[in-house]
Image: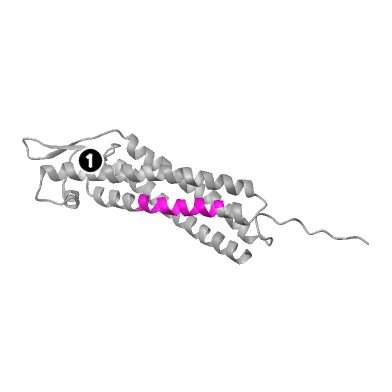
């Protein structure tokens, strides 16, 4: 049982390390995206072609991008904290953590984070699809990625497709990974509780 526990802890730590990089990538590319669009969030933007044959965007609320950025920075902090906690458990010689209540609490936190990550993934995916739909409606012969070659006096669209595609893939990847971390926390709470301290019989 100790070997199985150590395997669960080791795999959990590896996944948490991956989550740190994944969430950092989402937060960074979304921040860069906002910077390229002069502080606006292109998710759910509407496009209009005017008399000069240029496409203009009307931006939606910036809170969509802010939510994704803030959530993933929080996720990075939580992944580091949980990773350190699990690392300490892995290095202990006894077969289970004495902090079973903490383990259960971390599991609950992870399940809440799964829901919040699911919301973020939907925001990015639906907003990305809406933006591409708007752009293609103005230039039906083009693919969405080709709009990166366009120029604008108001913002820089050169990497919007790459940034949004990266954020979308990483966001959906984070959902099952956090679900695994949550399930592993509950399993560690249920299956591997601390054994009673050894006692000596005096004669």
Q: Main secondary structure of the magenta part?
A: helix
Identify the residue at the far right of this view. 203
In the depicted structure, whether residue 70 falls above or below residue 19: above
Q: How is the image coloured?
A: one colour
Q: Which residue is mark 1?
A: 155
Judge left or right: residue 197 versus residue 172.
Answer: right
Tell me if residue 145 is in the magenta stretch. Answer: no
How many numbered circles does the render carry? 1
Residue 203 picture location, percent across and down? 94, 62
Q: Foreground: 108 or 80?
A: 108
Residue 118 picture location, percent across and down? 38, 45
Residue 85 picture location, percent across and down? 59, 52
Identify the residue at the far front of this view. 190
The quarter of the picture where residue 59 lies is top left
Q: Foreground: 132 or 172?
A: 172
Identify the residue at horizontal 60%, vertical 66% (top origin): 3
In the depicted structure, whether residue 14 falls above or below residue 28: below
Judge left or right: residue 114 versus residue 60.
Answer: right
Task: For residue 123, say whether it is visible.
Answer: yes
Residue 135 picture location, percent across and down? 16, 43
Judge left or right: residue 116 versus residue 57.
Answer: right
- Magenta span of residues: 170-186
Identify the residue at horizontal 27%, vertical 38% (top origin): 38
Q: If the image is split into quadrants, where does the N terminus sit?
A: bottom right
Judge left or right: residue 192 versus residue 132.
Answer: right
Task: For residue 156, say whether it is visible.
Answer: no
The quarter of the picture where residue 40 lies is top left
Identify the residue at horizontal 35%, vertical 46% (top origin): 121
Identify the residue at the far left of this view. 51
Give neighbour class at mark 1: few <14, some 14-19, many 20+ (Cα, 10 Å): some
Identify the residue at horizontal 37%, vertical 42% (top origin): 119
């Amino acid at each position: 049982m100790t070997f199985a526990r150590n395997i669960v802890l080791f795999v959990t730590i590896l996944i948490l390390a991956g989550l740190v990089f994944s969430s950092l990538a989402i937060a960074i590319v979304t921040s860069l995206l906002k910077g390229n669009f002069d502080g606006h969030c292109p998710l759910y933007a509407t496009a209009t072609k005017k008399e000069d044959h240029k496409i203009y965007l009307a931006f939606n609320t910036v809170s969509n991008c802010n939510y994704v950025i803030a959530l993933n920075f929080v996720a990075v902090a939580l992944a580091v904290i949980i990773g350190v906690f699990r690392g300490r458990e892995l290095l202990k010689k006894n077969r289970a953590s004495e902090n079973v209540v903490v383990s259960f609490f971390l599991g609950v936190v992870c399940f809440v984070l799964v829901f919040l990550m699911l919301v973020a993934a939907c925001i990015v995916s639906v907003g990305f699809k809406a933006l591409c739909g708007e752009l293609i409606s103005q230039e039906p012969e083009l693919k969405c990625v080709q709009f990166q070659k366009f120029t604008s006096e108001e913002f820089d669209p050169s990497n919007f497709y790459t940034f949004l595609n990266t954020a979308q893939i990483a966001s959906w990847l984070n959902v099952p990974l956090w679900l695994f971390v949550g399930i592993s926390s509950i399993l560690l709470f249920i299956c591997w509780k601390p054994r009673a301290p050894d006692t000596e019989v005096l004669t």
